[in-house]
Image (spheres, rainbow, N blue to C red):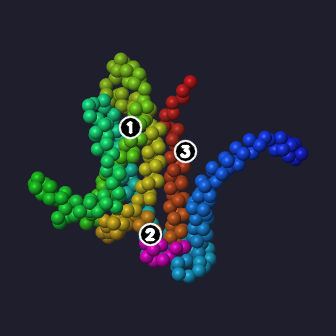
């Protein structure tokens, strides 16, 4: 450890160029640091305080302790636990479906065929369509009375469905609808597939492995870090699901699509209960953090990290 006098001597001995580079470095990172403090950390601290208050927006916040957190678990009319269970069910349906579909599309697009770049572009193209426009289009397609999907099924002699209009099928329909935007996840899987050395497949074929064994014993283990990354990011995104149920179903029918973020939005901007909404936001943060840490804690059992010499 340097003494106080040695520290002053250390800084005095620095050249003018050192001080210039140091000041320039801090100036370059200053916008990011200020943005983080003003737009992220500051609002988080403010929302944490508001979660312990009764804040009807048009009046000053009034400190009430942990009553908001108690009400979330004990007041049925808030539907916090119901919306959380709907979100969990949606995540259990949508997340595996998205991962499997994204991986399958990436495997198809990883083939060395003529014109494969066109198909890669076509598969990714729906992602750049604004989400709100996509939701309105699918709302029209799935309309039970004059939607194109039911009209096609009827023309083919197949039974039609009420899709978003029935409690039994509404949440599943939203989960299937989320497959429209698998482009980013598919691209990440494709990058992971292209990072697997071809020599490993050649060695497996020499040993007599078929396509299924190559996939099970080479592709999946080598791709496990990519799968884990997409799993974590998909989990976070799924718990923040909001736009499709807000636009298409408004949480119905019979609250079957009343996801957590929709409930939070209503408490904040319809009920004008900002303190309760802040508490709900922190509960959501705690749930996502706990699930993410749980995934990381158990990742060593199923994620293979190649050690390069």
Q: What residue is shown with label 2?
A: 265
Q: Are marks 2 and 3 in contact (CB under 8 Å)?
A: no
Q: Describe the element under mark 3 as helix, strand or loop.
A: helix
Residue 48 in sight: no
Mark nearer the N terminus (2 vs 1): 1
The location of residue 102, given as percent across then percent down, is 35, 43
Q: In the picture provided, is 186 more to the left or to the right than 164?
A: right
The residue to which callout 3 is attached is 297
- Magenta-highlighted stretch: main secondary structure? helix
Which residue occupies 74% across, 41% down? 17
Residue 148 among magenta residues? no
Q: Secondary structure at mark 2?
A: helix
Label total for image? 3
**Quadrant in which the N terminus appears:** top right
Residue pictured at 33% horizontal, 54% vertical: 129
> Considering only vertical position in the picture, is 248 above or below 30?
below
Element carrying mark 1? helix
Q: Residue furthest bottom?
A: 59
Residue 307 lies in quadrant:
top right
Choose mark 3 or mark 1, whichever is in front. Answer: 1
Residue in the picture at 29% in, 44% down: 122
x and y percent of residue 183 in the render? 36, 46
Mark sitting earlier along the chain (3/1): 1
Q: Position of residue 217 (x, y in %)?
A: 40, 29
Asked if disc 2 and disc 1 are in contact, CB closer than 8 Å, the reply is: no
10 Å crowding of disc 3: few (<14), some (14-19), many (20+): few
Residue 190's disc is: 1
What span is in magenta? 266-275
């Amino acid at each position: 450890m340097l003494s106080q006098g040695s520290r002053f001597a250390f800084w005095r001995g620095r050249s003018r160029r050192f001080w210039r580079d140091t000041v320039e470095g801090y100036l370059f990172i200053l916008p990011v640091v200020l943005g983080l403090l003003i737009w992220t950390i500051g609002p988080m601290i403010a929302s944490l305080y508001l979660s312990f208050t009764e804040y009807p927006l048009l009046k000053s916040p009034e400190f009430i302790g942990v009553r908001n957190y108690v009400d979330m678990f004990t007041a049925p009319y808030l539907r916090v636990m119901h919306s959380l269970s709907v979100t969990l069910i949606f995540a259990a349906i949508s997340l595996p479906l998205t991962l499997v579909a994204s991986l399958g599309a990436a495997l198809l697009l990883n083939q060395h065929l003529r014109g494969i770049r066109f198909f890669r572009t076509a598969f990714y193209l729906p992602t750049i369509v604004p989400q709100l426009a996509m939701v309105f289009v699918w709302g029209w397609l799935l309309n039970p009375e004059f939607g194109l999907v039911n009209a096609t099924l009827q023309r083919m002699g197949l039974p039609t469905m009420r899709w978003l209009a029935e409690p039994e099928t509404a949440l599943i329909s939203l989960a299937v609808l989320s497959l429209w935007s698998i482009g980013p996840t598919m691209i990440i899987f494709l990058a992971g597939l292209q990072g697997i050395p071809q020599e490993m497949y050649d060695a497996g074929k020499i040993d007599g492995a078929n396509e299924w064994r190559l996939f099970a014993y080479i592709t999946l283990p080598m791709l496990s870090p990519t799968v884990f990354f997409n799993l974590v990011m998909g989990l976070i995104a799924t718990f923040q699901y909001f736009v499709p149920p807000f636009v298409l179903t408004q949480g119905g029918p019979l609250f079957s699509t009343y996801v957590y973020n929709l409930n939070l939005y209503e408490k904040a901007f319809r009920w004008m209960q900002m303190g309760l909404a802040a508490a709900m936001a922190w509960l959501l943060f705690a749930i996502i953090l706990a699930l993410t840490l749980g995934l990381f804690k158990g990742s060593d059992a199923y994620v293979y990290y190649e050690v390069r010499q």
